[in-house]
Image: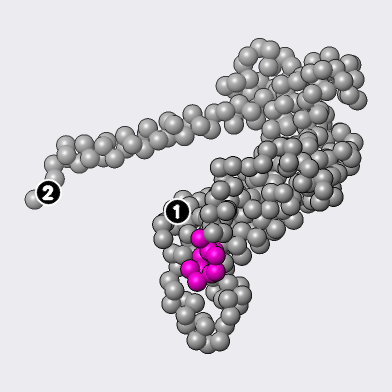
Amino acid sequence: MRASPTSMSQRSWSSMIPNIILGFFAILSIFPFYTVLISSFASFDAITSKKVYLFPTSFVLSNYKTILSQEQFFSSLGVTVFITVVGVSLNMFLSVTGAYALSKKQLPGRNLFLSMIIFTMFFNGGLIPWYLLVKNLGLIDSLFAMILPVGINTFYLIIMKNYFNSLPESLEESAKIDGANDIYILIKIIIPISAPFMATFALFYAVERWNEWYNSLLFIHSPSKVPLQILLRELLINFNTDIGSIGAAIRDSKSIYVQGVQMASVVVTSLPILFVYPFLQKHFASGIMVGSLKE
């Protein structure tokens, strides 16, 4: 018996309504990014007319030229790239090896180690002991002050451990029968089959290292070792407080305005991560859900 056209039309509309609602909320979530982008290219007259928030009425590059013309921009960019590459490599090495070791139930003192690690998620020594520790390690005014103190994210470590626990034990048992040790199994078997899952956390770590500014604010004194985030922060402070090398003539010019430089700064700092996200987005949900399984 064939369905009537009316019932088919009702089913069609019922399936479209959720898509329409989700599309509406997707537009709402994208709109702030759209506003930031067009504001970064807007002139002073366009922003004061309040027409730029919906449709761009001007296109100027002076806001980006102000950022790129800073003497330390490319050196700070190099520092940020170094922190991201070296930091993520260290983060993944420590997290993967630590999580794999903690996933072994026969590890001596495993529960004690897990309890101590989980304890750090809720309690810490505070800012002053942390600063004294970094100072005693000789990391003050060193790029590694922005890498070593944040070598492991405890939350990511626990999720990775749970993921390794969810893998079939037969994979390792068959490899050990052939004479493979734990290091060989990790490198040749576990890591290859876990690549999408690890790519998710590599991106999480990359976002954290790319946006690094707090440790730099505490421990870095040399201008040549300042990351990009701190440089742009100082640039915006100079705009607002009339201090720095920009000059009153530029600040008073209608071709450059504070909000435009702020929006351009957001675009410059967000663009590299936005380019990477689409390639790894499909791994996010599956990676988090698999790693959140209980033992």
Q: Position of residue 208 (x, y in %)?
A: 66, 45
Q: Which comes sooner in the sequence, label 2 or label 1?
A: 2
State the image coordinates of residue 244 (x, y, percent, origin top left). 89, 24
Left or right of 52, for residue 172: left
Q: Nearer the viewer, residue 268 or 85?
A: 85
Per the rendered image, the range of residues in magenta is 102-111
In front of the other: 57 or 162: 162
Quarter of the image holding residue 11?
A: top left
Q: Is residue 166 above or below residue 179?
A: above
Q: Residues within 10 Å of mark 1 (few under 14, many from 20)?
A: some
Residue 61 position in % (x across, y down): 77, 29
The residue that appears at 8% across and 50% down in the rendered structure is 1
**Which dot marks residue 2?**
2
Q: Which residue is mark 1?
A: 292
Residue 73 visible to the viewer: yes
Q: Amino acid at mark 2?
A: Arg
Q: Amino acid at mark 1?
A: Ser
Q: Residues within 10 Å of mark 2 (few under 14, many from 20)?
A: few
* Nearer the observer, 227 or 280: 227
Question: Which of label 2 and label 1 is nearer to you?
Answer: 1
Residue at screen point 69% across, 33% down: 266
Name which quarter of the figure residue 211 lies in. Answer: top right
